[in-house]
Image (cartoon, grey):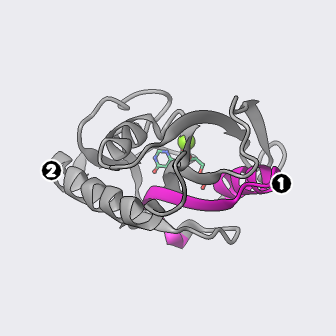
Amino acid sequence: MEVLLGAEAIARRVGQLGEQITADYRDRGARGPLFIGLLKGSFVFLADLVRRVDLPLEIDFMALASYGRATVPGAVSMLKDIAADVAGRDVLIVEDICDTGRSLRAAQELIAGRAPASLRTCVLLDKPSRREVEVPLDYIGFEIPDRFVVGYGLDIEERHRNLPDIVAIDPGPGR
Ligand code: IMP
Ligand code: MG
């Protein structure tokens, strides 16, 4: 295991993102933005990020499942929808990592179809070398190389989400 991003570097960057979001949404109305975290990977990032945003805000969660090329190529299905009504809201999608882009693209299309006042996307990690579909990203924590990473919410087969650092691993054959 190789530490790619240590907990302190992550915290510093998350603070900067929080300040930027605070400034960008300051004059957008009393209700504030609706943060939609994509489960499960974003839960640590979202928890830290919202504590660095100095605005009224609301939080909801959506869970999507993506299937590998073996089944339906690039298909994404919804496991859990948000409870909130996004119509007229300033929505910020929060995701752990943008890899092929398919999950985020699906989430963006779903939410965009429900007439939000605005829609932006915030990712902690971006792996641009792996992109398969175009996805607008408004806030990016770190661009990383084509390595498989775990920790800070990210998993391999549901493990290592609790690591405080982001660590690159060899995911083994077939990944
Ligand atoms: P997508 O390929 O951009 O649709 O990403 C789908 C999902 O794959 C992400 O939300 C992550 O949960 C997962 N993923 C992509 N790259 C990694 C990684 O390096 N480590 C852990 N999970 C990853
Ligand atoms: Mg995920």
Residues under labels 2 and 1: Cα distance?
Answer: 38 Å
At a point 78% along the width and 49% down the height, the residue shown is: 110
**Pointer 2 or 1: first along the chain:** 2
Residue that sits furthest to the front in the current view: 30
Residue 100 in view in this figure: no
Q: State the residue in front, 148 or 75.
A: 75
Location of the N terminus (image quadrant) = top left
> Does the magenta segment cover residue 112?
yes
Q: Quadrant of ligand 2?
A: top right
Residue 113 marker: 1
Looking at the image, residue 46 sits to the left or right of residue 61; the answer is: left
Looking at the image, residue 131 sits to the left or right of residue 21; the answer is: right
Residue 46 point in image, percent of width and height? 42, 41
Residue stretch in magenta? 102-129
Kind of residue at disc 2: Glu
Residue 8 marker: 2
Where residue 104 sits, quadrant-wise, is bottom right
Q: State the residue in front, 157 or 95.
A: 95
At a point 80% along the width and 55% down the height, the residue shown is: 115
Residue 71 point in image, percent of width and height? 82, 42
SS for dot 1: loop
Residue 13 marker: none
Residue that sits furthest to the left in the current view: 8
Task: Classify mark 2: residues with Cα within 10 Å, few (<14), some (14-19) or many (20+).
Answer: few
> Does the magenta segment cover residue 105?
yes
Where residue 62 sits, quadrant-wise, is top right
Task: Classify mark 1: residues with Cα within 10 Å, few (<14), some (14-19) or many (20+).
Answer: few
Looking at the image, residue 47 sits to the left or right of residue 165; the answer is: right
Residue 50 point in image, percent of width and height? 38, 43
Residue 116 point in image, percent of width and height? 73, 54
